[in-house]
Image (spheres, rainbow, N blue to C red):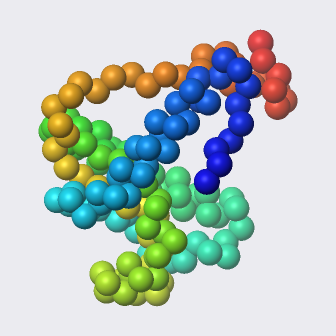
Amino acid sequence: MPGREYKAGDTRGERQSLVRDSAGYLTDNFEKAPMMMIPCIDGRLDNLPSFAAAGAWGSLLPAVWSFMLAARSRGLGTAYTTLHLKYEQEAAQLLGLPDTVTQLALIPVAYYTGEDFKVGKRRPAEEITYFNSWKSTL
């Protein structure tokens, strides 16, 4: 799948192939994770207006993030993925989830390889923080 095009000097373009390779590796090795967590919401979000769906996601994502941070503090690595959602119905059937439940992610959990975590390259906040209107920076 072709990636998004970035302007020269935008570090996202430089990392795009690494991100794609990492996602491919994860996809090929899911079954090796000793644990997978699927956070769910009781209720379907399919036909909700965007503000209601955003509220539902917003009620769950802080808990998921806290889980991931707690895992890391215990030497466990996690990855927030949505790759399995293309097969949400099959996963629900396999796990015995009722049709009224929405799966929001699949988070593999495993001990990491012992390599140090490092800060990811990020664009300066000044480049992506807007004031009063889109693309209006200070």
Q: Closest to the observer: 64 or 88? A: 88
The residue furthest top is 138
Dividing the picture into quarters, in which one does residue 8 lie? top right
Towards the viewer: 93 or 28: 28
**Up/down of 54 relative to 74, above or below:** below
Q: Nearer the viewer, residue 2 or 88?
A: 2
Q: Is residue 122 visible?
A: yes
Relative placement, left or right, of 100 versus 66 is right
Question: How far across and down, in percent of the image, does residue 99 sit?
Answer: 46, 87
Q: Residue at x 32, y 84 (%)?
A: 94
Count how many numbered circles sit on residues in the image.
0
Eyeballing the image, is 127 above or below 103?
above
Q: Is residue 51 left or right of residue 113?
A: right
Q: Residue at x 23, y 24 (%)?
A: 116
Say whether residue 125 is visible.
Answer: no
The spot of residue 46 in percent (x, y) is 62, 75
Residue under the point 59% across and 23% down: 11
Residue 106 to residue 90: above or below? above
Quadrant placement of the N terminus: bottom right
Can you give x and y, in whole percent of width and height, for residue 71 in the image?
22, 43
